[in-house]
Amino acid sequence: MSHKIAPSVLACDFANIQSESEMLNKSEADWFHIDIMDGVFVPNISFGLPVMEAFHKHATKPLDVHLMIKDADPYIADFKKAGAHVLTVHWEACTHIHRTIQAIQAEGMLAGVSLNPGTPVSVLEDIIQDLDLVLIMSVNPGFGGQKFIEGAYKKIKQTKELIQKTGSKALIEVDGGVNAENAPKLIAAGADVLVAGSFVFKSDDPIATIKNLKEI
Ligand code: DX5
Ligand code: ZN
């Protein structure tokens, strides 16, 4: 299976959601990566459901929603209604992670769990069988445009081993500071989905940049 590319719309021009979405529709991007930040779990507020719905209205590709919010449970059904295909929560932000995963899947979405750079992969041991996706953060969540943290390679390899050992079907996604230089190494380490924000949207030709990442 070839890897997927999920451009993070956090870096796009929010005054032009329609044309930015149409650009992604036309490109070789597989998913739209949607970053939801609450200003509590992470020190930044991005946008919420109405803006996500605006992307959903124009996107012809699945929405990969990355929740950086504390206690997501009350909002799971709302994110389904707003068009989420994958719903990823942070391990660090959920008190009852197993229940949260079940609730996401019961709504008919794929369930992901994300780990901050400081959280070991071993916390996934008892839930890996239930997961559709593991999101390894290669920056501390909260902002686009940060420097890639090298420890991500080791964590991707550890996650891959855990998946193989348990027969889990989970995809491995990596998010933060992804660019053309680290992408080949991330894929070699076992990443199935690359998220890229600034590298795509701040480039001169986002469609060509996405194509280059896809052809690695
Ligand atoms: C960070 C977000 C990322 C971010 C990636 O908290 O989860 O998805 O938008 O942006 P870049 O690729 O610019 O690091
Ligand atoms: Zn993200």
Image: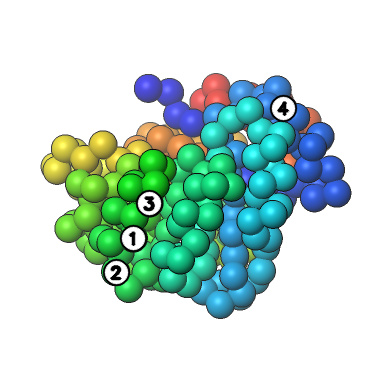
Does residue 190 appear left or right of residue 74 in this picture?
A: left
**Secondary structure beneath label 3:** helix
Q: Earlier in the sequence, mark 4 or mark 3?
A: 3
* Residue underneath mark 1: 100
Q: Residues within 10 Å of mark 1 (few under 14, many from 20)?
A: many
Res. 131 mark: none
* Residue underneath mark 3: 104
Q: Earlier in the sequence, mark 4 or mark 2?
A: 2
Q: Nearer the viewer, mark 4 or mark 2?
A: 2
Q: Quadrant of the N terminus?
A: top left
Res. 207 mark: 4
Q: Earlier in the sequence, mark 1 or mark 4?
A: 1
Question: How much space separates mark 4 and mark 2, taking CA atoms?
Answer: 40 Å
**Secondary structure beneath label 1:** helix
Q: Residue at x 48, y 40 (%)?
A: 85
Q: Are marks 1 and 2 in contact (CB under 8 Å)?
A: yes
Q: Residue at x 24, y 48 (%)?
A: 130
179 or 129: nearer the viewer: 129
Residue 59, how many percent across, how many down?
66, 33
Identity, as a three-letter code, of the amino acid under mark 3 = Ile
